[in-house]
Every structure is written in structure tokens, then in C-alpha cells.
């Protein structure tokens, strides 16, 4: 089981076109702390070539992410 499986399950059951979660709320859903890079770098939240990467999996669910590193939250937009 991947660390982010619970979050992907959560995301697939959303009905809103956009919503915002704090980093703490995301950590509650995944059951562990996000890595330090998530707190420091916007690029962490961008899809990459890694199929199993968190941002790529979120994109595969039909959402894009807009992180706010200062306020430690992410807005998810249905695409």
C-alpha cells in the first residue's frame, strides 16, 4: 500500500469543483507527515514523470493542485 492511497481514495470521492486542505489535513488523511520538500518547494506539488508520485496520481484523479507554502495549504481544482 502506498502512503498516499488513502488520499487518492478521499480525492476520488470529492464532488466539489475546488476545495482547500491544510497540510495538516492532508497529513491526517494520509496518516503520516508530509516530507520536508512539501513544506519548502512548490515543485513538490507538480506532476513529474514518476507514475507513482503523489502529484501525478492527483492529476490522474482529475485535479490540479495550487500550493500555498506560506499558509501551508493546497487548493485542488477539478480539471
Image (spheres, rainbow, N blue to C red):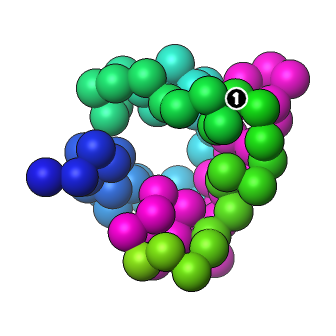
Which residue position holds label 1? 39
| Residue drawn at the location 70% of the way across and 29% of the way down | 39
Which range of residues does the magenta coloring cover? 52-79
Q: From where the camera sits, is residue 11 visible? A: yes
Classify 24 as above or below 35: above
Q: Where is residue 60 in the image (x, y as percent from the top left)?
A: 45, 77
Classify 77 as above or below 6: below
User: Where is the C terminus found, in terms of image quarters?
Assistant: bottom right
Q: Where is residue 46 in the image (x, y as percent from the top left)?
A: 69, 63
Label 1 Cα crowd, 10 Å radius (few <14 / some 14-19 / many 20+): some
Q: In which quarter of the image is residue 32?
A: top left
| Residue drawn at the location 13% of the way across and 52% of the way down | 1
Q: Which residue lies furthest to the left in this view?
A: 1
Of 18 and 35, the residue lying toward us? 35
Q: Where is residue 47 in the image (x, y as percent from the top left)?
A: 62, 70
Of 68 and 48, the residue lying toward us? 48
Q: Can residue 35 be found in the magenta stretch?
A: no
| Residue drawn at the location 52% of the way across and 55% of the way down | 16
Left or right of 16 on screen, residue 8: left
Of 72 and 33, the residue lying toward us? 33
Left or right of 8 on screen, residue 44: right
Q: From where the camera sits, is residue 61 visible? A: no
Amino acid at each position: 500500500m502506498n502512503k498516499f492511497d488513502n488520499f487518492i481514495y478521499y480525492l476520488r470521492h470529492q464532488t466539489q469543483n475546488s476545495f482547500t486542505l491544510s497540510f495538516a489535513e492532508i497529513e491526517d488523511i494520509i496518516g503520516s507527515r508530509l516530507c520536508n520538500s512539501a513544506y519548502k518547494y512548490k515543485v513538490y506539488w507538480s506532476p513529474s514523470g514518476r507514475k507513482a508520485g503523489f502529484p501525478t496520481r492527483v492529476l490522474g484523479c482529475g485535479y490540479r493542485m495550487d500550493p500555498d507554502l506560506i499558509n501551508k495549504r493546497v487548493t485542488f481544482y477539478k480539471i
